[in-house]
Amino acid sequence: MTVIANDISSTIGTRIRAERALRDWSLAELASRSGVSKAMLSTIERGKTSPTAALLVRIAAAFGMTLSTLIARAELQGGGLLRQSDQPVWRDPATGYVRRHLSPVSDMPLELIRVQLPAGAKVSFPAASYAFIRQQIWLISGQLEFTEGDVVHSLEPGDCLALGAPSNCIFHAPGADAADYLVALARG
């Protein structure tokens, strides 16, 4: 997957501030609900830092949404067709994890996300990030070890995994190449 120059880091802070305002929450309220400090939230909202996936998942969960929804709301304008050149791409500054939102904005409960996890990289997400969704992972290329609670799934290209009940999860690309995979999320 090629990363295009569609960096949405600058719009994420604005979206978080807007979501907080919609709920009439103070920074303290969002900090309490997300477990992210007020200072960090302020820095993110002002666009002074590019937040990691782990932080964004906690913030999105506090709003009752997925990371994908938060990113999509930051970038997408709507419409039935989302061209590749307009698909938001976000890179986790901590791991190099690259997430491309494939789905157009709609009221459908389905979202498609393509992820590239660099060789050797690990990304962890708390169970709270899966509270509002069901998901399946389809490995396109590379190798992926997916830890779901205490269970480790080793995926090879073409394998598809349906996740169970929400639990702490770790994505790991153990091979010499990046893991390239599709995530299908169903809300509700």
Image: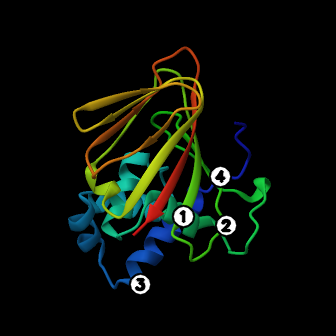
Tell me residue 53's x, y (percent): 43, 47
Helix, strand, or loop for circle 4?
Answer: loop
Q: Are marks 4 and 1 in contact (CB under 8 Å)?
A: no
Instruction: Name the residue beneath numbered marker 4.
Output: 7
Closest to the camera, between mark 2 and mark 1, is 1
- Looking at the image, residue 85 sits to the left or right of residue 68; the answer is right
Answer with mark 4 or mark 1, whichever residue precedes in sequence.
4
- Identify the residue shown where x is 65% and y is 52%: 7
- Residue type highlighted by circle 1: Leu
Q: CA distance from mark 2 to mark 1?
A: 10 Å
Q: Nearer the viewer, residue 187 or 125?
A: 187
Q: CA distance from mark 1 to mark 3?
A: 24 Å
Q: Which mark is residue 104?
A: 2
Q: Which mark is residue 22?
A: 3
Answer with mark 2 or mark 1, whichever residue precedes in sequence.
2
Answer with mark 3 or mark 2, whichever residue precedes in sequence.
3
- Residue type highlighted by circle 2: Pro
Helix, strand, or loop for circle 3?
Answer: helix
Answer with mark 1 or mark 3, whichever residue precedes in sequence.
3
Q: Quadrant of residue 148?
A: top left
